[in-house]
Image (cartoon, coloured by chain):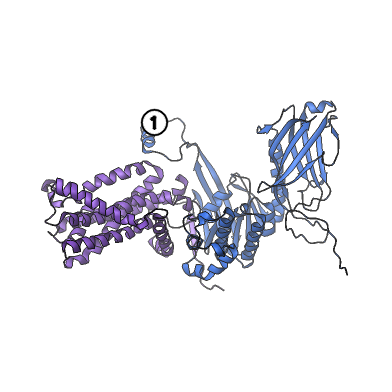
Chain colours: A purple, B blue
Amino acid sequence: MKSAPLQKLVITSARTWSFPDLRELWSFRELLMTFIMRDIKVRYKQTAIGILWAVIQPVVTMVVFTLIFGRLGQLPSNGLPYPAFVLAALLPWQLFVKALTQGSMSMVALGPIMAKIYFPRLIAPVSSVLAGLIDFAIAFAILILIMLWYGIAPGPQVLLAPFFVLLALCAALAVSLWLSALNAEFRDVQHALPFVGQIWMFLTPVVYPASLVPEAWRWVYLLNPMVGVVEGFRWSLLGGPTPALMGMVVSTVVMLALLVGGLFYFARYEKAFVDRL
Amino acid sequence: MTVAESIRVEKLGKRYRLGQLEPYRTLRDTLVSLATRRERSNPPKEIWALKDVSFSVRRGEVLGLIGRNGAGKSTLLKLLTRITSPDAGRIEMEGRVGALLEVGTGFHPELSGRENIYMNGSILGMSRRDINRKFDQIVDFAGVENFLDTPVKRYSSGMRVRLGFAVAAHLEPDILVVDEVLAVGDAEFQRKCLGRMNEVAGEGHTVLFVSHQMEAIQSLCTRAIWLEQGSVARDGPAGEVVPDYLASARFRESETLSGRVDRSGEGRIKVTLIDTDDGAGRPPRTGAPLHIRMRVEGEFRRGNDEALSVRIAIRDSMERVVTVFSNEFVGVDLRSDGSSWIVCSVHELPIVPGGYYLDFSLRVNGLLEDKVFRAASLEIVSGDFFGSGKSEHLGFFHVKQQWSMAQ
């Protein structure tokens, strides 16, 4: 016989602005893991070369960018070998942009399941954002090989690298929360995403160092939360000039504001989500 | 909420907007409608899919929800399972809710049977430990031992359904909510499901059950709520509510037959009403007489003495033809003599209880005059076919039989 008191639940029609129930999300952590594993297992099913795609994408991008921006464009790279310089930025960038794409589609992708069973809707964007970590891990192994090749040893600041990865994930989640909600109602998001991703990359110091941006524009530039993430991650692994603390703080604050706002927006909209689908 | 209650629903309402042609909006549409908001003459129509619904369910009660399509049954389940949220009223529930609105929710065709058991189990709210503990039982129930590592896309649809139900059947919620899952799968499988639900109910769990199969409702539920246009039409013992509901449903369906346009044939004469009962105004039941009365209108009534041939096919919920009645089979001549009713009577109905449909065709002098598929529904309720006091209903038909011992 069960002796534990039965959990009590009250459902009302009240529609108020509230923060998502994070404790409830935690109690569903097993389901979160299940969705992440499902994402990863399914991603490269029925492809000829499977997980190799996770290797090819960053490597080919690195080679092409090195040829075009490094050789032809002669862009500066903080005195670092250009391939290492650009790959170290591509890692957090691709983590962000893939997580953003998957996260934004997640509500629609999991819609059929959500129409049949209840779980905290937040699981959808969170799980697809986290599922991107597997590709990130593979690309990270390549970066280590490149660093060995060029004989680059990271300094003590390497300990900060996980922090920048976390920031990239949070930034992706923040934007996904807004866009996944929007995408359920306006499929325009789906069409705009690839395009926005491209433009955004050039507004982020991936192929060039942030120092290239004129001082007068720096403050606008820093509103892009990925500036701090990409510069910070690259610095933590490859060294080079220390990024300005002020820039880091601004990027982080903007990101946190987006994230908290996104959580509120999402919590309000998730109740009506199934009806709008 | 009193101690013995496990669900309490108060003045519950759910509103939907009508008239949205597009399944989703594009930004452009919204901008256009913002710009033209002033001139918009007719705001989107709203309907209340549920309105003012109140009831409470005691712990351990097995409650059936019945009603026609669109009466609000599924909406109510979606509110109780938190899939969508209400626009009015409140729900209080005590205990873990397990929802089974679909068999195999979240199955991924590329993943193996084993992976999908874990997938589906955790979507339904089981912990990994629960699933590990019950894994063998689940596999056994589904009968898929040899295909555990085969991707589910290679499964037959029957196997997929069995696997899905097997997982769900091993949930142990305090409140189990089940929607029409019995509509899938073969008769054998349906019986297995019903048996399992009986067990769950017997263990003192609260069960809410939606079905169009009145037989299932009657045999499983102690109480039934009949929803009509989003409100509670009746709430009471299943044995009372179900016959009332059937009587009203029969009335409505016979009423609409004359207006049906999905019919074929010359159409000089038409069947405008089909009525079924046990010859005494009660719902047809296994072992009792069955009377099918068809009202015919048109030139037929002038008494021009032509040869009629009538066929009535009975189909089960899986669309299988269970049997066909025809005056030709039994060698009875029917002439158009001016009467307005054709009557087919069966002395002892051998068909097992369940939901069936009637198709009919009517020929005059060999020429097809009228034919309608699913012209009427036929709900057969449980009865004592053998006169033995037992109402065991296995298979499709009962056959009279003798038993003895012999040397």
Image location (x, y in percent) of residue B176: 57, 60
In this rendering, the answer to whether B28 lies above or below A264 is: above
Q: Nearer the viewer, residue A22 or B359?
A: B359
Tag 1 residue: B38
Residue B400 place in picture, x, y as percent: 83, 56
Vertical relation: B370 (above or below) A202: above
Q: Could you tell me which residue is drawn at 27 percent across and 54 percent down? A: A58
Q: Residue at x 22, y 51 (%)?
A: A63
**Name of the residue lying farthest toward the right:** B407
| Label 1: few (<14), some (14–19) or many (≥20) C-alpha neighbours in 10 Å | few
Disc 1: which chain?
A: B
Q: Quadrant of the C terminus of chain B?
A: bottom right
Residue A235 in sight in this render: yes
Q: Quick check: can you spot residue A221? A: no
Q: Quadrant of residue A142?
A: bottom left
Please tell me which residue is depicted at 42% across the width and 48% down the height of the picture. Answer: A108
Tell me the quarter of the picture where residue A119 sits: bottom left
Give the left or right position of residue A219, taking residue A190 as reference. Answer: left
